Image (cartoon, helix red, strand yellow):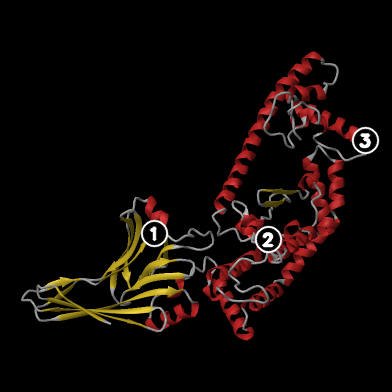
Amino acid sequence: MTLSYDNGEGLVFHRQIAVDERYMFTIRDSVENKSDKPVTLAPYALVARHGLPKTVNYSVLHEGFVGVIGDGGVEEIKYDKIEKEDHAAKTLSGVGGWLGFTDKYWAAAVIPDQKEAIEARFSAGLTGPIKSYRADFVGPALVISPGASSETTSRLFAGAKEVHTLDAYQADLGIKKFELLIDWGWFYFITRPMFQLLHFLYTLTGNFGVAILIATVIVKGLFFPLASKSYLSMAKMKAVAPQIAAIRDKYPEDKMKQQQETMALYKREKINPVSGCLPMLIQIPVFFALYKVLFVTIEMRHAPFFGWIKDLSAPDPTNIFNLFGLLPFDPTQIPMIGHFLALGVWPLIMGVTMFVQMKANPEPADPTQKQIFTLDAGDLHLHPRRLSLRPRHLLGLEQHPLRRPADAHHEKSRRQNRALRQYRRNVQKKGHELMSEASGEAAADEPDFNEIGRKLFAQECDFLWAASSASQLPPPGAPGNRFRRTLQRRQILAAQRADQPQDSRAHVAHAGPHART
């Protein structure tokens, strides 16, 4: 297609637009100077976006401005960064390259002559009430004499970010680092070969689901020597767990002695506590790279697997709440809670396998570190300290609008935990005052700990968890935490008499009408 325009002042512009069988437009612009004066013109091209996509700011890939200018690396700028900088334009200079916008699967980029020096710019503004974003470049100025003409060529890519298509454009047209239009991430040296492996397996099997399974088996096989060392170390740790517990019972007050005896035990049994963690840490980048490939590449979009799985990039269409399709209703359409009910076959299988794997790990010797399950507001926390399993990730909620309320819930929980720590400090301060009164009234006798608990928690409190025992209230000015040791001794004796494990909250079970344990 050819377009022509005469400006009436002696300049005639011609634009020829051609498109190949994929996603590349080639634009040839020429100018004829029919006037009697020389004119100065410069090549210019831009790609603009009005408004933002429905989903933006993924945590595992970049969406926004992107480009490679000259011999530099890829430049990635978020939409909101330009806005926070009061719409200040970012300018780059170099020879050749490309610039534009990228989404998860799609991109639009303008491409100058790769031998031409350009000045590229990313900017944002307002087009009426709608936000607009621009990526443009200006080439070197050209002087066109009377009767002469000049021509320049640029290109526009607008389409899907297919890996082999981008590779072909990079090789055939000499576009610098055009493959980086796909966000391969920091582990490019792992993610790119991982894609090549998946694509090769796909050409053999004809099914991306099978290719993913085979690739996972291959990766697990390569890491089997490291994994076996990790499992062996965990088995040894599990075998000596009773001995470690015995050491803690033998030296309950001497932490230094506990550490010395524990390290001596490790030395006798030839156990390296860190050896179980390092092999797992080495595997993390590889499996993250596999996840990255599955997330950012369009080749698996709408790719079927078997049975009811028609699209590997879509959430599991089955649902346990309608008996996997036997009942004629969709639980996910229930207002407010629908997407929390998106529990299909694959999430169930994944949850069960992760649960079994967690249970196979050695149980912590410290009772306070044992696994605790709590189900609240869409989160199933599995705590061997901080590890957590969150069904909203399993249920495909990451791309749903309910993600933000769920994140707000986690932020609220974090603030509540911080308030709990502050409350515990206030409890300790109040305990100091009560212990000073108790020691002044009965210096010769031991204080009545139940009475102290009733005084301490007689008023309503918002948080009472694990810190509810007077055993965590060391008296002010008492050398060596004598009060804490006395209370712990009394608790141990009481537990032995009752022939049951010691409960650190026993002394506040009836501390007041508002106390909660």
Specify which label sits upstream in the sequence, 2 or 3. Answer: 2
Compared with residue 465, is residue 171 higher up or lower down, i.e. above or below?
below
Query: 86 and 480: which one is in front?
Result: 86
Q: CA distance from mark 1 to mark 2?
A: 34 Å
> Between disc 1 and disc 3, whose residue precedes?
1
Q: Which mark is residue 51?
A: 1
- Measuring from the top left, give residue 88's x and y in whole percent: 32, 54
Asked whether residue 476 is in view, the answer is no
Q: Secondary structure at mark 3?
A: helix
**Residue topped by disc 3:** 498
Distance between the alpha carbons at the discs numbered 2 and 3: 44 Å
Q: CA distance from mark 1 to mark 3?
A: 69 Å
Q: Residues within 10 Å of mark 3 (few under 14, many from 20)?
A: few
Image spot of residue 21 (x, y percent): 41, 84
Q: Which residue is mark 2?
A: 343
- Residue 75 appears in which quarter of the rendering? bottom left
The outermost residue toward the front is 328
Which residue corresponds to the image point at 28% horizontal and 72% vertical from the top-left?
117
